[in-house]
Image (cartoon, coloured by chain):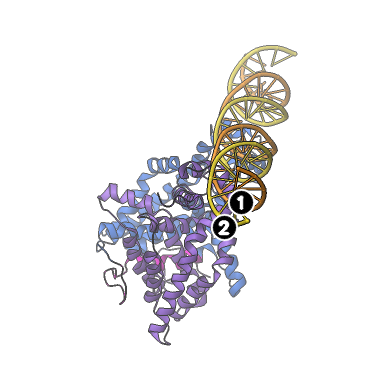
Chain colours: A purple, B blue, C yellow, D orange
Amino acid sequence: MAQSDTVDRILDAAEELFADRGFSETSLRMITSKAKVNLAAVNYHFGSKNALIHAVFARFLTPFSATLENAFDELEERCSGKPPTLNQTLWALTESAVRMPQRNEKGISIFMRLLGLAYTQSQGHLRKFLEQEYSEPFSRFMRLLKEATPQLSSVDRYWRIQFMLGATAFTMSSSDALRDILQNKLGVETTVQEIAARLVPFLAAGMQAEDAMLIPPAGSKVSVA
Amino acid sequence: MAQSDTVDRILDAAEELFADRGFSETSLRMITSKAKVNLAAVNYHFGSKNALIHAVFARFLTPFSATLENAFDELEERCSGKPPTLNQTLWALTESAVRMPQRNEKGISIFMRLLGLAYTQSQGHLRKFLEQEYSEPFSRFMRLLKEATPQLSSVDRYWRIQFMLGATAFTMSSSDALRDILQNKLGVETTVQEIAARLVPFLAAGMQAEDAMLIPPAGSKVSVA
DNA sequence: ATGCGCTTCAAACGTATGTTTCAAACAGAC
DNA sequence: GTCTGTTTGAAACATACGTTTGAAGCGCAT
């Protein structure tokens, strides 16, 4: 499938296997045999397994960050000065993800799963790579979030952003498994787009929650300094 | 540190290393050298690496599930018939987690991180083990959530529970790092209890969000079947 | 003191991994 | 056709892994 070019075949196979099984659990031999390519081809074309992982991310993250920049540009223009709302910002993000040109029907879920893995698996080299390659759209997203939630203190906002990231990364990183469970338990089919569409309102509501922190229910012993 | 019993030393070292690096990325040799124990001791006492993973989970999950059952009993009794609210249910859970006797100051965050890994890393054997060992408190929590959110459809509720799990596991699993960042950036100290106290309102609000799914903002092309 | 479980130990086993090697095959320019 | 730089191929490399082995050490009842 795809092109018969060795580099692309390796990237396709690696992408899918990484998404399915994680990085350490995927060997170069799995990748090359799935790609129907000689084992040495990976080291020849990419240099090392880590460099292959970077290449897999770069292939979809580079166009995605461009799309995202455009979406943010358009959004800020449409708001003409006023800061975009939280909902608008979150939708801009998810739409950019969903609208990305996909290599195949699994494209978006592989995309999400890889992003989740990047956060979850503590691969030092990966985090470093992502931070220095894609810090700009990330900071911009953070700035938009800040402007969209002026009522929050810096500390509150900080933690709630972590909660959002967590819900997203976690859900997306196991979205296939979760979809399967839902399919078996309730007989419901779900697309990634639907998951995203359910996630956004959840996040927005959580982000804008009234802060009930200081009044836990009666009987609680949790103390807040 | 801890007792000088081999089994416990292995469990302590394994727990910490697993939480830091994941399961596949942690070798038995790392564990045994951290525990200052002979390599063969793991297979002697536990049988295999997978069995060791199970033992690590069992050691904290068994007392925790007992504590949780008690908390739920007490909660349901206090509500005398009426289903507990979402806030009450979530507080019962987080208090049980926070109040668990900790082996050390990192206890709660290791606990969370391991739970997150269990969900995230696609270790088939682990998921099977957890499902058949701890299905009861899990189902009970699910039932309480269901009764506390009768307005949600089963599918909505399912996904929102995943979102909650994700936000919790992710945040708690990296809470040390996140606390440090906050300390450096804003000069604010934070305890795990405070994080929990911020998390619960976020989760409750997300869980009870109005379902804006079908009315994404103008310009959106996300379609929901 | 002896014998008997249980536990520890150093060493090895077999297998799988990422990487390297070097010859063969190939493509395009002259 | 021949040369040149690039790509593929089969094989080997060194290393790391989980697991097994068999002897040594230990505590304790007899």
Q: Amino acid at mark 2?
A: Leu
Residue at the far bottom: name it: A81
Q: Chain of mark 1?
A: A
Determine whether the residue tagged by mark 1 lies in a helix, strand or loop: loop
- In the image shown, does A193 or B95 lie closer to the viewer? A193
Give the number of the disc on residue A47. Answer: 1
Q: Work out which quarter of the rendered image holds the C terminus of chain B and state it.
A: bottom left
Q: Is residue A44 above or below residue A59?
A: above
Q: Find residue A224 and report its horizontal and vertical position in percent.
A: 50, 69
Q: What residue sits 33% from the left and 49% below the top?
A: A180
For disc 2, the marked residue is A126
Q: Find residue B185 and report its horizontal and vertical position in percent.
A: 60, 73
Q: Chain of mark 2?
A: A
Q: Which residues are magenta?
A: B194-222
Q: Amino acid at mark 1?
A: Gly
- In the image shown, does D22 or B88 lie closer to the viewer? D22
How far apart in space, not on screen, are marks 1 and 2 (Cα)? 15 Å
- In the image shown, does B53 or A66 lie closer to the viewer? A66
Q: In this rendering, does residue B80 appear at all?
A: no
Total count of labels: 2
Q: Is residue B223 left or right of residue D2?
A: left
Q: Find residue D29 and report its horizontal and vertical position in percent.
A: 61, 19
Magenta-colored stretch includes residue B185:
no
Q: Is residue A47 above or below residue B206?
A: above
Give the number of the disc on residue B121. Answer: none
Determine whether the residue tagged by mark 2 lies in a helix, strand or loop: helix
Q: What residue sits 44% from the left and 66% below the top?
A: A164
Disc 1, disc 2: CB below 8 Å?
Answer: no
